[in-house]
Amino acid sequence: MGCVSLPFRRLPHQPKLFLRFLDDFPSVSNFYAHPPTFENVTESPQSLDFPAERRARVTPVLRDINASLGSGDATRRNLDRLENGAVAVVSGQQVGLFGGPAYAFYKALSAIRFAEELSEAGIPAVPVFWMATEDHDLDEVRHVSWFHGGKLTRFELPIEGPSGRPVGQRKLGPEISNLTKSASELLIGPGSQTVANFLLESYTPEETYGSAFGKLFARVFAEYGLILLDPLDARLHQVAAPVYRKALADRDELSAKLLQRGKDLEAAGFDPQVKVTPESTLLFHMKDGLRQPIAYIPENGAASKGGQFKSGEVSWAREEISRLAEAAPETLSPNALLRPVVQDFLLPTVAFFAGSAEISYLAQSEVVYRHILGRMPVLLPRADFTVLDAKADKLLQKYQLCIENIWAGPQGLRKQMESVSLPKQLAEDFDKKKALIENTLTELTADIQKLDPTLAGAVATTREKMTFQLDKLREKTGRALDERAGLIAEHVEFLENLLYPNKVLQSRELSFLPFLAQWGNEGLKELKDLAGSANLKEHRIARIS
């Protein structure tokens, strides 16, 4: 596998705060607990005071979850290590159809490789993947794009049932069978049968978005011991109940801190990623299968301890909702700002791999971490790749292109490809040459007729033949140019569909599974090695050999 790298600042559509986090951390250090370095992670276990009682409660739940998903011996060994004191390297993602976009797989590889590096450095560590099954945005997870033969195929499940249900509880339904069959048939390469089996075993009508995703990841990462966590498990909510209680009891103080953090971010030139209002809380309420935000309604329109918490048609006094968090924590669900805090309350996390948008909103979560947990793991950018197949690699070389030419847009791309491929101004030259010949023949006709008027017919015949042959040559050349231009259009479509599909980075749009089928398991190992700490601040261009 050939590979080159680019700094993240050269990628399109990167959040300004994320780039400053990587390139100039001191300028944003007020918003984060630690610089994003391997050295900071190695220091974390020394200060991590994770209760043995909590570890003993969480590990058996993780054993049950992973057993139900079909995780293998490597995961069971890592669960033993976690139970015996290992720290956790964590990442996570929504449970998208067929594993969702490729970067979900890259997050898992980041956690796996970094846990290996820590273990090699003498710090026992295990990789954990948080499946965001409580998220209720079905439209975000019910589709995925497949690259095949230069074209994009979109696989999509319909929306069924009421909105607001956690996606991890939604059954895939009968339509999934045809989608899985169609997707499997498009796989090519040495790993195609293995990947097809993964799909057919994981994505069946009786599975949910959460269980299917988990079973797929359990199979893809079987030999690496990835531990999967499903936060819908009621037992994990029971362990996390103290976080919910504190988030509710200290709502006013947390709200003030988050509002101030938003102002601080804006003053520094950054846009807060998660909207926070004076009525916001950090929790959702789950009732009758629906997940709805909990708001705080102050008494008489002013902040006071006598206000009401409200979700849909249900409302509670402060004491009542506190009792709810104690007696039925499974009916509560953290929002985007509290979710990572719950994650790192449940796990002895020393490093958390996140995407660019996540790292931006974690600047807001930092105040929640500090207030509730008193600690925050080291945040690290997940590995990111753009995958080139052999044809794309040849086309880039043929037209003297780099990846950034594709990201710049179709007009500049086509211009560059035409400048390399097509003779300049060839069509215009035909017009000029034809006019020159016409003028020359006109001058010759006049001279020849003066010399011998009987030659006028021969001159006219010669003019017609030359004009005919020139027009015929132009027509043939035009067809060749059209064919060449059509080929260029085809090549533009191929490169854009693979490298900038729907004007989005490849890792955010395309499924990873067709690449895995082309590469096979050896390719997955190579990507895992490239996801290590040496490449934390780089986007990698990986070539399928």
Image: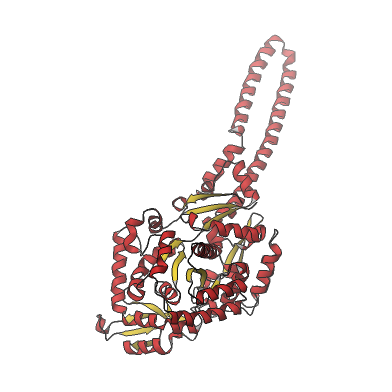
Q: Is residue 222 left or right of residue 122?
A: right
Q: What is the quadrant of residue 223 in the picture?
A: bottom right
Question: Is residue 190 depicted above or below 436 in this figure?
Answer: below
x 44%, y 70%: residue? 349
Q: How is the image coloured?
A: secondary structure
Outermost top residue: 451
Q: Is there any visible trace of residue 338 in the rendered image?
A: yes
Q: Is residue 174 left or right of residue 117?
A: right
Along the viewing direction, whichever of 260 and 446 lies nearer the viewer? 260
The x, y position of residue 90, in whole percent, is 48, 69
The x, y position of residue 248, in whole percent, is 34, 81
Q: Is residue 189 left or right of residue 502?
A: right
Q: What is the quadrant of residue 74 in the picture?
A: bottom right
x 59%, y 50%: residue? 495
The x, y position of residue 307, in whole percent, is 29, 85
Outermost front residue: 122
Along the viewing direction, whichever of 253 and 291 lies nearer the viewer? 253
Question: Is residue 246 depicted above or below 122 in this figure?
Answer: below
x 37%, y 63%: residue? 34
Along the viewing direction, whichever of 437 and 175 lies nearer the viewer? 175
Q: Is residue 368 left or right of residue 429?
A: left
Q: Is there any visible trace of residue 186 in the rendered image?
A: no
Question: Is residue 491 depicted above or below 380 in this figure?
Answer: above
Question: Is residue 432 depicted above or below 498 in this figure?
Answer: above
The x, y position of residue 20, in whole percent, is 38, 55
Along the viewing direction, whichever of 48 and 175 lies nearer the viewer? 48
